[in-house]
Image (spheres, helix red, strand yellow):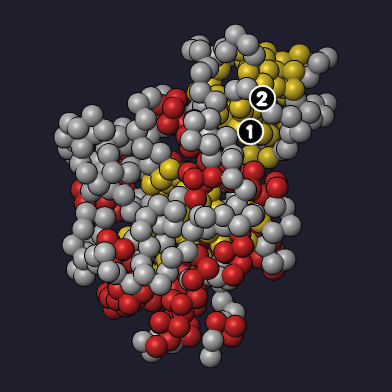
Amino acid sequence: MGIVDYKGIIIDTHNDTMMKAVDKYTQKPSVDIGQDTSFQIDINKMEKGKVNIAYFAAFTEDYGTIQSNNHRILASLNALANVEIVNEKRFSVAKNYTQMMAEIERGKRVGVPTIEGAYSIDAENMNGLLKQYADLFVKAIAPVWNHSNALGEGTYSKFASGSDSTGGLTALGVRFIAQMDALNMMVDVSHMNETTFWDVIKYTKRPVIASHSGAASLKPHLRNLNDEQLIAIQKTGGVVNVVFCRYFLGDESAGISNLLDHIEYIVSIIGDEHVGLGSDFDGATMPIGLEDISKVPVIIEGLRDRKFSEKAIENIMGKNNLRLLSAFDKQNDYRVRFNQHTSPVILEDHKTIEWYMDVDCNNLEVENLVFLWDGCELNCTYNEQSKKIVAHSTIEIVERYHVATIEFKDRVGKIYFCTSISELK
């Protein structure tokens, strides 16, 4: 039996490809992954490797300001949306479970937006910005990366400044977990110290995901999980996705057998219904023999050689993460999305934002309009004749990418909204 006989879904829950697909200086989309590239992931390689779904991380570390961190996240989310626009017949961004499965049936590859490192969050913007990220179809967020932030302690237990951090999740981080649960977004525990990890387990009411981690019992490393952590993720109903990074699996000579060792070990601790794949393609050094996403089918052959059942293989290769995507798919029926044909425009004063409302407002209570900009509510006006919303930022807009949301009610109280990424030209 070969890979041509394998009919299951294949999912990879972490890559950094969009970080490489944008221009280093402007952060505008600069590489079309619909073409052959030197990257470890592009659409051609996904098709060759029969990978149906890949989680594309919007990565940020602490670049110094909340605004610059948010700009970096939005740049990656914008780049992923652009992949769909220029490759509409082959690739789709996941909006909801039903749409995603329909696109797979049509033979498309699907990209799931995620965030690695929520350095854009602070006490002022969190409630609004998390809601906006959810509106942009983000399905998982790692609250911290290696450095600590306003939400909690990262892998290094230090801030970017070099000063030590203490205490795991902050009070803001606890609120972050509750809002993530309410917004149907998965909390990713792959980048945090152990104190933060156990705080997440304490406060979340939902399954958690480790998007790219290994087994600390096989390879002691800050980025790997010990047996107690593995069991804790299992008890939430979550999934541990085994990282491919050579140095988290073993050493410079690590190959596919080392990856299989970690998969086999974690399955022995928490069962095959809680294990998946989280490569870290385009963000790490891959194992020998698994250099890019086209090679993923060798994992199937390796699992078969180790006498895993076909059911277990299907679980590990994708079915477990498909279960999580379904579990986090509930839609909030009190908010109704509408699509705009225009995007917000930032005027030359770098403080005024204009947005033409391309929608019939006859049955809507537009006087109750709310305008969110990068998570914060701004004062705005609406002109019924021109159908133009004008909002004013209290600070100068200097970064390229921002996110705007308009919300208003109809006469029975249902909320209509549109969320869009805005680009400073």
- Left or right: 300 in relation to 267: right
Q: Position of residue 37 (x, y in %)?
A: 56, 54
Q: Residue furthest top?
A: 349
User: What residue sits 61% from the left and 67% below the top?
Assistant: 47
Q: In the rendering, which numbered label is found on residue 185? A: none
Residue 52, visible in the rendered structure: no
113 vs 53: above or below: above
User: Circle 1 sits on which residue?
Assistant: 420
224 vs 144: above or below: below
Q: In the rendering, which numbered label is found on residue 344? A: 2
Name which of mark 2 and mark 1 comes first in the sequence: 2
Q: Are marks 2 and 1 in contact (CB under 8 Å)?
A: yes
Q: Position of residue 186 (x, y in %)?
A: 44, 52
Inspect the image, locate mark 2, and give the three-letter code of the amino acid beneath it.
Pro
Q: In 3D space, how far apart are the residues under numbered discs 2 and 1 (Cα atoms)?
A: 7 Å
Residue 306, visible in the rendered structure: yes
- Left or right: 197 in relation to 81: left
Q: Quadrant of residue 115?
A: top left
User: What residue sits 25% from the left and 47% below the top?
Assistant: 155
Q: Quadrant of residue 52?
A: bottom right
Q: Position of residue 147 (x, y in %)?
A: 27, 39
- Left or right: 230 in relation to 33: left
| Foreground pick, 422 / 370 | 422
Label 1, secondary structure: give it: strand
Q: Position of residue 78 (x, y in %)?
A: 59, 39
| Foreground pick, 280 / 264 | 280
312 vs 424: above or below: below
Label 2, secondary structure: give it: loop
Locate the C terminus by quadrant: top right
User: What residue sits 74% from the left and 22% below the top?
Assistant: 356
Inspect the image, locate mark 1, and give the three-letter code of the amino acid beneath it.
Ser
